[in-house]
Image (spheres, rainbow, N blue to C red):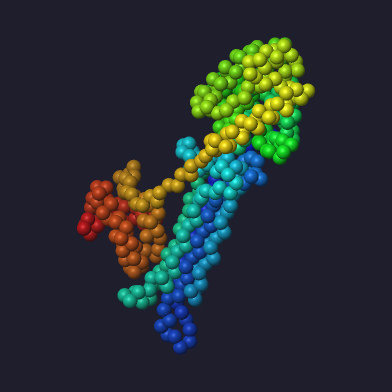
Amino acid sequence: MSNFVDETGVFVKAGEGGAGAVAFRREAHTPRGGPDGGDGGKGGDVWFVADRNVASLLAFRDHPHRKATSGNHGGGKGMHGAAGEDLLVPVPEGTLVRERDGTVLADLVGHGDRWLAGEGGRGGHGNARFLSNRRRAPDFAEQGEYTEERFLVLELKLMADVALVGFPNVGKSTLIAAISAAKPTIANYPFTTLVPNLGVVRTDDGFEMVVADIPGLIEGAAEGRGLGHAFLRHIERARVLVIMADVAPPGARMHEADRHEQERVLLGELLDYRPELLDRTKIRVAARADLAPEEAAEAEAEGWLAVSGVTGQGTRQFVGAMRRAVEEARESGEDPSAYVVHRPEPEGIRVVREIDGTLRVVGRDAQRAVALSDLTNPDALAEAQRRLNKLGVNKALGKAGAKVGDMVHIGAMSFEYGEDDLR
């Protein structure tokens, strides 16, 4: 089984908030000590963090759940519960985070980029928080905030300066092995390369660039034929594209297309997949040139680079051409890896009508307003009503067409909409 995984699902759950405590001072010579219940601790957040030391999404294949710790409950004598620890989840540079429906939430490109995948629940207030001139002995507290498990899709797009693009078995793996320390699988059968390979190419003066060997593309790859549909994404971030065409004699290659036909098919697939890829700097390489000297010479006359990873022919010139193209792309400021992080705005409150005709008030603040320990307690119920009025829930219900007798749900609380709620 491959140790390279470039797309996976992950279940994320932030830590839940701890509950506030109901407690009263019980000390000698203090007959009316008052409430002293402490607050619950906040639950831990879940963060995705781009890490250059992580190569793929393999860690999520067998263990897809990521859960932060919950906050501790509050205690008496004003003791607050400890907050849960945040969970930092390392992912490779170039990881895209999506919803199930494909909505892009974040694109973590550079080392250290982070995105909040799950926000920890807020801790509940202890009864000491509800002390007022009118309420001298509050005997209720607030529950900690619950968090829901969230399913996300992670997709990796490799970070490389140069992408080698070509048909299967045109010598891409052999070439990247010849110019870098990468050790890809090399064999004489179609689709030998099943996963992208990255190699760091270093020149004598210390210049470095990352080259990616993309699994072979065939006609129709943008529509899912062969392996191309799964790996075309890894070309997107490359600054320079190397179009490799096999110039070996027909009997020595696994397809009948000549150099020009191979180029036409490859550029057509890039156009179908993402048209802007054709605007990138391109280097045309006549691969396996040692097997066809005459064809290689003809290609060179047309501006191609004749290269052989087996004999080393043209590799120095090829590395020099890649370096010049990469330097120009870096200096121009063009950065195909530019990213956007989507940060959803707080949703406030809204009213939706359920299938059974009842109304449900949706929103974190509304649910927090009724998250009290004992809503059968008159003081707790009055506090919940005060909070809901402050949020404008009654007005929202009126605008949503609530009528007397309608059942309304807010979190775990349900009540019948009455005359008082219409005011």
- Counting the numbered discs, the total is 0
User: From where the camera sits, is residue 340 visible?
Assistant: yes
Q: Residue at x 68, y 38 (%)?
A: 207
Vertical relation: 326 (above or below) 306 = below
Q: Position of residue 164 (x, y in %)?
A: 64, 27
- Name the side, left or right, on which 247 lies relative to 343: right
- Name the side, left or right, on which 46 lies relative to 136: right
> Which quadrant of the structure image shows residue 246?
top right
Vertical relation: 398 (above or below) 172 = below
Work out which residue is located at the far right of the displayed protein and give it: 311
- Name the side, left or right, on which 410 lies relative to 312: left
Q: Position of residue 159 (x, y in %)?
A: 60, 37
Given residues 56 and 413, the one toward you in this image is 56
Vertical relation: 72 (above or below) 307 = below
Q: Residue at x 40, y 63 (%)?
A: 372
Q: Residue at x 53, y 55 (%)?
A: 45
Which quadrant, please, contains the C terminus? Answer: bottom left
Vertical relation: 16 (above or below) 4 = below
Work out which residue is located at the far bottom of the displayed protein and give it: 29
- Name the side, left or right, on which 381 lies relative to 311: left
Given residues 90 and 319, the one toward you in this image is 319
Which quadrant, please, contains the N terminus? Answer: top right
Q: Residue at x 57, y 59 (%)?
A: 85
